[in-house]
Amino acid sequence: MKKNILICILNLFLLTIVIGEDDNDLIERFNVEDDDDELEEEEEEIVEEKNNKKKTADKKVKKINVDGITIDLGQISNHGISDFIQKFCKDKNIKTKQIESKLFKIITVGGLQLTQSKLLLSLGDKVLNNLDKWTGSQKIFNKVLKVDSKYCLVLFKNGSDFNNFLDYFTKNTTFKANALAKQLGNFVTTKFDLSVYTPTRAKIIENVVVSSVSKMATQSIFKSLGSHGTKFFFTEGISSNMQYDLCNKKVLCYTISYEMNKLSKDEINKSWAESVKTIIKDKDNNIRRDAYFLMEIDLVKNTMADYQQLWSLSRYVILRSKKKKGDQNKLFNLIKESANNKRITDMVKNAFNLKVATLTKNWYRWAYAQR
């Protein structure tokens, strides 16, 4: 009886509009779950790794098998992009230069000089190491790659060389590039990224490299899993969080708008965590999104608020995942579910054992507590 009375009092409290509530009040309100049968928060799982006393034979394992599918990103080619570049530039008498690490290489075209090439290569490697940790430390992303399967960023000094090469490349391969690629001076796919070194990109080149490698690697894991496409939630979510972690918490490559418009100081210095906190506090502002919307989101007509919430939800998933190994890793399981063309509701259920509405509330509560 006492329990029922307390529940009634709690429900009446939730129906009350509280004016001027402070942060702790709001966090507490997000703590309340409407569905008594649903777990509000995922239980922290203690994963005992059977081989933790072995000095991981992972280093000897070259391929990962997931649900009958062998994941080996070394088998995904960069389509001989280096050879295409060299042949094109030799015919046109255009200068090129190549620098590389064990995982990543950068080719500059047209006499472009990069003053911080070692830093940029190290950022590319850090992206791949981070991504491996985020998805369960399975040695998928940071395995040493052969020359023809390394991630490759090609930077063109001028737009005319980029346009001419894109015409040449698409004419001699099965790749197709639309008019938007030329307009933006960018074409990215599984293992290579072609970009014009515009003044805007030059100003934020560290973010450009981090974003580029993130998107190439994300598309590669989906292709390795047999998917013909990658959901925007994963490419943009992982890219924005990599930038946040590796570029002094500045997310500057999040949409084509960074290239179409000049970045203002407000955009560069704005705290995305604070912006999301403001957005989710007001449920009637018409810009607050739920997890379903953000996981289903597409490239077209997204607002700054959409990208910020997508970043935040992705961050919540990543932070809930990165200490989990192998098939216990929630981000990796979400990727698998998406690659198998599962519905959003099924993706969340299988990866988190939650309804999408519950995942949304858990994320809101977490996001509101961030600083």
Image (cartoon, helix red, strand yellow):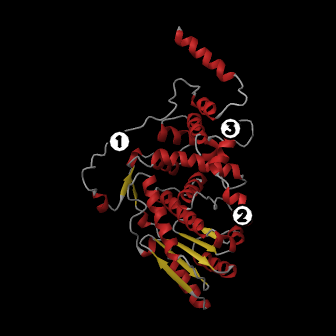
Q: In the displayed structure, would residue 368 be above or below residue 51? A: above
N-term mark: 2 or 1:
1
In the rendered image, is residue 205 in sight? yes
On the image, numbered disc 3 is attached to which residue? 281
Label 2 – label 3 distance at C-alpha: 27 Å
Residue at the outermost top position = 1
Callout 1 touching callout 3 (CB < 8 Å): no
On the image, numbered disc 2 is attached to which residue? 263
N-term mark: 2 or 3:
2
Residue 34: give x, y in percent of width and height.
59, 25
Does residue 318 appear left or right of residue 310 in this picture?
A: left
Residue 47: mark: 1
Residue 220: mark: none
Amino acid residing under circle 2: Leu
Q: In the displayed structure, would residue 306 be above or below residue 74? A: above
Callout 2 touching callout 1 (CB < 8 Å): no
Please identify, in this view, whether the residue under mark 1 or under mark 3 is nearer the observer.
Answer: 3
Q: In the displayed structure, would residue 355 be above or below residue 370? A: above
Amino acid residing under circle 3: Lys
Q: Nearer the viewer, residue 187 or 153?
A: 153
Q: Nearer the viewer, residue 4 or 268?
A: 268
- Name the residue located 60 percent from the left edge and 91 percent from the top edge: 93
Residue 173: give x, y in percent of width and height.
57, 75
Q: Residues within 10 Å of mark 1 (few under 14, many from 20)?
A: few
In the rendered image, which quarter is residue 252 located in?
A: bottom right
Secondary structure beneath label 1: loop
Residue 210: give x, y in percent of width and height.
55, 64
- Name the residue located 64 percent from the left edge and 80 percent from the top edge: 157
Callout 2 touching callout 3 (CB < 8 Å): no
- Name the residue located 66 percent from the left edge and 33 percent from the top edge: 22
